Image (cartoon, rainbow, N blue to C red):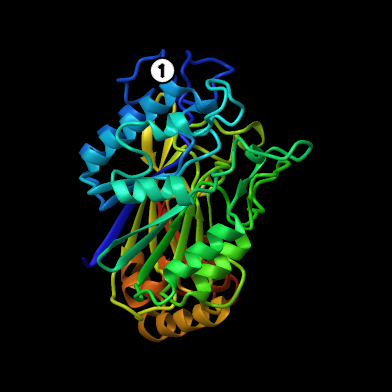
């Protein structure tokens, strides 16, 4: 495998009733399910066929149905698996979310996780041993070639809490026992060039979430330290939950995990984010360069965004995660912009250069997280007078004075 491709669908929040002001999702089961401009599931199936999108794995970040409604959960999971077939994905992996567990016992008086465990095909994986481990131990590992995937149940304690305490459904949690068990499992494990932890809740607080938020994962920082200290290769963490997309790095040294907070696939944006976010679908591409090739997982994420009445289209810069985003290349942005300036002045002074040619010379440009990428562009323009110009939401050329 020269390149690993992972499609990500998270937090569809399918609603079992009709659309309306109180409907939390653009997918309402009592509405037309076949119109690609009015239903994100129908639309993404069309997009995949039209653009020939394919992947190795499809990750579903949980919150299948809104408020754990059983028929909405099954409808969402069925469609996720149909999308995986369209993508020619070899496997689907899920992450149990707070809306997947009947933690308020609306449909069952004692078994909060019974209905999500009863989904068909089996959730979060069709691998029988790993399915049993996920629900019994709250985590499991899947290893395929040079890729290690840690499926972590951050909703494992929903439905339980000590009387008088904040209910568990207000946040995620990974227990000390789970962290210790993960560490033991990784002890002496083979180094892999790509390690991915997949869960529903934020392992650390996302500062872009502005509302009062109890929802990050208790003990998540200890889990991050544990996987990093296992020394089994670089890590990337993928999760959903609060519908605010972001790419950033965990605290720590230069090999700290990359964290990708996925936005929602179909939920209507919260009022405070209505103009800044849209439903999003992602395709992650990670070059496979062999063990020890890099201390970080590097790659690129392509983004499609949903608009009711229009359907899916390439992401728009300034909205959500934008058109695309990179990750993994960690460097001094001022020094990097000076290096780019020196090359352009020496080889292309007074000219316009196609963007693709610049990326071919400096491939790390496409592996910078959005905040670092923006800093490089700002340094190029403010310090060196070099402008990077867009066409149809993508960079097209570089003007060198």
Mark 1 falls on what kind of element?
A: loop
Left or right for 351, reference 244? left
Residue 226 drawn at (x, y percent) = 54, 69
Q: Nearer the viewer, residue 339 or 149?
A: 149
Q: Residue at x 35, y 64 (%)?
A: 148
Left or right for 55, reference 154? left
Visible in this render: residue 7? Answer: no
Examine the image and state in which quarter residue 378 appears.
bottom right
Examine the image and state in which quarter residue 225 appears.
bottom right
Q: Nearer the viewer, residue 221 or 330?
A: 221
Residue 371 drawn at (x, y percent) = 56, 63
Q: Residue at x 55, y 41 (%)?
A: 243
Residue 222 drawn at (x, y percent) = 61, 64
Q: Nearer the viewer, residue 91 or 365?
A: 91
Q: Relative to 346, is 2 above or below?
A: above
Visible in this render: residue 25? Answer: yes
Location of the N terminus by quadrant is bottom left
């Amino acid at each position: 495998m020269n390149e690993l491709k992972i499609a990500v669908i998270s937090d569809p929040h399918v609603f079992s009733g009709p659309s309306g002001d109180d409907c939390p999702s653009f997918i309402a089961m009592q509405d037309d399910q076949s119109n690609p401009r009015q239903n994100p599931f129908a639309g993404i199936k069309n997009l995949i066929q039209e653009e020939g999108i394919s992947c190795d794995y499809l990750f579903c970040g949980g919150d299948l149905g809104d408020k754990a409604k059983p028929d909405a959960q099954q409808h969402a999971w069925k469609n996720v698996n149909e999308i995986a077939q369209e993508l020619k994905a070899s496997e689907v992996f899920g992450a149990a979310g707070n809306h997947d567990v009947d933690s308020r016992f609306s449909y069952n008086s004692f078994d909060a996780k019974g209905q999500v465990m009863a989904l068909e095909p089996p959730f979060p994986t069709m691998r029988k041993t790993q399915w049993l481990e996920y629900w019994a131990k709250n985590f499991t590992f899947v290893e395929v070639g040079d890729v290690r995937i840690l499926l972590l149940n951050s909703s494992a304690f929903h439905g339980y809490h000590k009387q008088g305490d904040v209910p568990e459904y207000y946040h995620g949690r990974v227990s000390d026992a789970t962290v210790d068990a993960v560490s033991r499992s990784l002890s002496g494990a083979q180094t892999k060039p790509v390690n991915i932890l997949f869960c529903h809740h934020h392992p650390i607080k996302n500062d872009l979430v502005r509302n009062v938020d109890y929802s990050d994962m208790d003990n998540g920082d200890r889990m991050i330290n544990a996987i990093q200290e296992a020394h089994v290769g670089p890590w990337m963490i993928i999760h959903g939950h609060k519908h605010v997309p972001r790419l950033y790095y965990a605290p720590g040294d230069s090999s700290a995990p990359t964290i990708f907070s996925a936005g929602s696939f179909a939920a209507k944006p919260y009022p405070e984010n209505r103009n800044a976010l849209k439903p999003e679908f992602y395709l992650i591409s990670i070059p496979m360069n062999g063990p020890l090739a890099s201390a970080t997982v590097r790659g690129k994420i392509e983004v499609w965004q949903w608009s009711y009445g229009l359907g899916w289209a390439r992401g728009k810069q300034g909205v959500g995660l934008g058109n695309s985003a990179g990750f993994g290349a960690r460097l001094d942005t001022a020094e990097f912009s000076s290096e780019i300036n020196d090359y352009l002045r020496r080889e292309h002074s007074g000219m316009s250069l196609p963007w693709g040619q610049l990326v071919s010379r400096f491939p790390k440009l496409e592996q910078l997280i959005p905040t670092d990428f923006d800093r490089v562009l700002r340094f190029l323009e403010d310090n060196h007078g070099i402008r990077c110009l867009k066409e149809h939401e993508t960079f097209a050329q570089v003007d060198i004075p």
